[in-house]
C-alpha cells in the first residue's frame, strides 16, 4: 500500500476509537434483541411493552439523525461525539438497573437519541480527518466493516451475556463506552474545515424534520401490527409527510437552513441513500426471518442461532481486505452492483427452505448475503459522502445513517406484516414455514429494486471510476 494510503499515528488512533463507537452501536442493538425473552420473563412485560422497548430506540435514533448530523457541523464534531457518547453510557446503565418497563422505555429512547447524534458526528470525523480518495475510502471501509461486525457478533455476545443475566446486555456497553470515552478525549481532535456554516440554528426546521422522522419511524413500526388500526397508522404517516413538506418550505425560505436542499439534487448521493435503505431493508428483514425459522420452527436456542448467523458476517474479513482493492480497481458502482447481485442469488437460494434443512443447506445463502453486505455497505458510505463539502459532512453522514436506519426498520416491519398476514390463525409448523417463505419475497424484491437503482449509476459516465456511485470505469 502506498505511503499516502497508510493509516498511522493520531489518525489511526482516531479511527480505532470511532470504529469502537460504531461497533458499540451495533452490538447494543443486537444484544438487546437476543435478550428480549429473558427481559419479559423477569420484569413481566406485556408484548406491547416489549415491542415498545425496541421501538423506543428506533424512534430516538431515526428521529434525531438528521439533526445530529447538522449539529455536528454547526457545534463541533468532536464535542458532539464526546457529549453523546457520555449520554449513551449513562442511559445504557439506567437500562441495566431497570425494574419496570417504563424505565426501559426511557433508557432506550434516550440511548437512541444519543446514537442519533453520536453516529453522524463519528462518521464526519472520519470524512474530515482523512483526505478524500484512497485513504478516506480505506478508513470508511474499515469503519463500515466494524459496524456490521458489531451487529453480527452482538448476537453471539448477547446470547452469552443473557445466559449470565440479561442486565449485562446493558452493563457491557457501559464498560465499552467508558473505555472509548477515556481514550477519545486525548486522541480525537476537531478537524480543520475550509469554512464553518454561517448563520444561526434553524430551530423551526429542526423541529419539523425531527418530528417528521419520529412520526415516520413510528408509522414504520406500526406496520408490524396491522390489526392495531390501519387508520391510525395512515394518520401517523400523513402527519410525518405533512411535517416533511413543511420542513421543505421552511428550508427554502431560511437564510441558514438546517439542510441545504441543493445537496439533495446530487444524483449519486440520492442513489446511494436509496440503495442504502434497500440494502438494510433486505438484510435485516432476512435476519429476522431466519431467526424466527431457527428458533420457532426448528427449536434452536438464542446462542445456537447467533452462532449460525456468524456465517453472514463474512464482511468482517472481506470489507477491510478485499473491498478496498475492488473499489480502487472497478469503482464503487460496479462493486455495489456486483454485491447486490450476489445477495440476490443468496436470497433466492433460501426461498426453497424446508422444515428439515440442514445447516449445510443454509450456509451458501448466509455466505453470499454476508459477501453482499461486505461489497455494498462500505462503498455506499463512501458514495454518500464523496464530493460533499467538509462543512456539510455531518449532514451527509446523518442522511446516509438515516437511510440505513429507516431501511432496517422498514424491512423488519414489512417481513413481519407479510408473515403475520399469511400465517393468519394457522399454528402448525407448515403454516409457519409458508409464512416465512412468503415474507422472504420482501428482501428479494428490495434487493432487486436496489439493483435497478444502482444500475442507473453504472450507466452514467461522469467521472473516473474510483470514487462515485454514479461512475463508470
Image (cartoon, grey):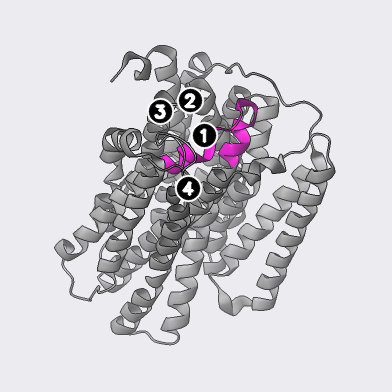
Q: Magenta part of the protein: which range?
A: 378-398
Q: Is residue 332 above or below residue 53?
A: above
Image coordinates of residue 58 in percent, x first then y, are: 56, 53
Label whose residue precedes the other's in the sequence (2 or 4): 2
Quarter containing the N terminus: top left
x and y percentages locating residue 107 in the rendered image? 58, 46
Marks 4 and 3: CB-CB under 8 Å?
A: no
- Asked if the magenta segment contains residue 251, the reply would be no
Magenta segment, prevailing SS (helix, strand or loop) = helix
Q: In whole angstroms, how far apart are the C-alphas of marks 2 and 4?
A: 22 Å
Name the mark on residue 139. Answer: 3
Any magenta on residue 389? yes
Mark 2, secondary structure of its residue? loop
Q: Earlier in the sequence, mark 4 or mark 3?
A: 3
- The alpha-carbon separation of the residues under discs 4 and 3 comes to 26 Å
Closer to the observer: label 3 or label 1?
A: 1
Choose mark 4 or mark 1, whichever is in front: 4
Nearest the viewer among 137 and 190 is 137
Kindly tell me whether residue 34 is visible in this rendering.
yes
Report helix, strand or loop for mark 4: loop
Mark 4–mark 1 Cα distance, whole angstroms, equals 17 Å
- The crowd level at tag 4 (other Cα within 10 Å; few <14, some 14-19, many 20+) is few
Residue nearer the viewer, 299 or 328: 328
What residue did someone put label 4 on? 460
Q: Which mark is residue 386?
A: 1
Residue placed under numbered mark 2 in the picture: 132
Q: Are marks 2 and 4 in contact (CB under 8 Å)?
A: no
Amino acid at each position: 500500500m502506498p505511503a499516502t494510503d497508510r493509516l498511522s499515528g493520531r489518525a489511526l488512533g482516531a479511527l480505532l476509537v470511532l470504529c469502537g463507537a460504531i461497533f458499540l452501536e451495533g452490538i447494543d442493538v443486537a444484544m438487546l434483541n437476543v435478550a428480549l425473552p429473558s427481559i419479559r420473563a423477569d420484569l413481566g412485560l406485556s408484548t406491547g411493552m416489549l415491542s415498545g422497548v425496541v421501538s423506543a430506540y428506533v424512534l430516538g435514533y431515526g428521529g434525531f439523525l438528521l439533526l445530529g448530523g447538522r449539529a455536528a457541523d454547526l457545534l463541533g464534531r468532536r464535542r458532539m461525539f464526546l457529549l453523546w457518547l457520555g449520554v449513551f453510557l449513562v442511559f445504557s446503565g439506567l437500562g441495566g438497573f431497570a425494574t419496570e418497563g417504563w424505565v426501559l422505555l426511557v433508557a432506550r429512547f434516550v440511548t437512541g437519541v444519543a446514537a442519533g447524534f453520536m453516529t453522524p458526528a463519528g462518521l464526519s470525523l472520519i470524512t474530515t480527518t482523512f483526505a478524500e480518495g484512497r485513504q478516506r475510502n480505506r478508513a470508511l471501509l474499515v469503519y463500515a466493516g466494524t459496524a456490521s461486525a458489531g451487529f453480527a457478533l452482538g448476537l453471539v455476545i448477547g446470547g452469552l451475556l443473557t445466559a449470565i443475566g440479561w442486565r449485562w446486555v446493558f452493563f457491557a456497553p457501559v464498560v465499552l463506552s467508558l473505555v472509548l470515552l477515556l481514550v477519545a478525549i486525548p486522541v480525537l481532535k476537531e478537524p480543520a474545515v475550509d469554512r464553518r456554516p454561517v448563520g444561526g440554528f434553524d430551530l423551526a426546521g429542526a423541529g419539523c424534520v425531527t418530528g417528521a422522522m419520529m412520526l415516520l419511524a413510528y408509522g414504520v413500526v406500526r406496520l408490524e401490527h396491522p390489526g392495531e388500526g390501519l387508520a391510525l397508522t395512515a394518520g401517523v404517516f400523513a402527519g410525518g409527510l405533512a411535517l416533511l413538506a413543511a420542513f421543505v418550505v421552511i428550508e427554502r425560505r431560511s437564510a441558514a437552513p438546517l439542510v441545504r436542499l441543493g445537496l439533495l439534487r446530487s444524483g449519486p448521493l440520492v442513489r446511494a441513500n436509496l440503495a442504502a435503505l434497500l440494502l438494510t431493508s433486505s438484510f435485516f428483514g432476512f435476519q429476522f426471518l431466519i431467526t424466527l425459522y431457527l428458533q420457532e420452527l426448528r427449536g434452536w436456542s438464542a446462542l445456537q442461532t447467533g452462532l449460525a448467523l456468524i456465517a453472514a458476517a463474512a464482511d468482517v474479513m472481506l470489507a477491510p481486505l478485499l473491498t478496498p482493492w475492488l473499489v480502487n480497481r472497478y469503482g464503487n458502482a460496479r462493486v455495489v452492483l456486483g454485491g447486490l447481485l450476489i445477495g440476490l442469488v443468496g436470497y433466492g437460494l433460501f426461498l426453497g427452505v424446508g422444515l428439515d434443512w440442514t445447516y449445510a443447506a443454509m450456509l451458501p445463502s448466509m455466505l453470499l448475503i454476508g459477501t453482499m453486505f461486505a461489497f455494498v455497505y462500505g462503498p455506499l458510505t463512501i458514495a454518500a459522502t464523496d464530493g460533499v463539502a467538509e462543512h456539510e459532512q455531518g449532514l451527509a453522514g446523518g442522511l446516509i445513517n438515516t437511510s440505513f436506519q429507516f431501511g432496517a426498520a422498514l424491512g423488519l416491519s414489512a417481513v413481519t406484516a407479510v408473515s403475520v398476514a399469511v400465517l393468519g390463525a394457522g399454528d402448525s409448523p407448515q403454516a409457519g414455514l409458508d409464512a416465512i417463505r412468503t415474507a422472504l419475497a420482501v428482501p428479494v424484491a428490495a434487493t432487486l429494486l436496489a439493483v435497478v437503482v444502482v444500475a442507473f449509476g453504472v450507466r452514467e459516465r461522469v467521472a473516473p471510476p474510483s470514487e462515485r456511485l454514479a461512475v463508470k470505469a
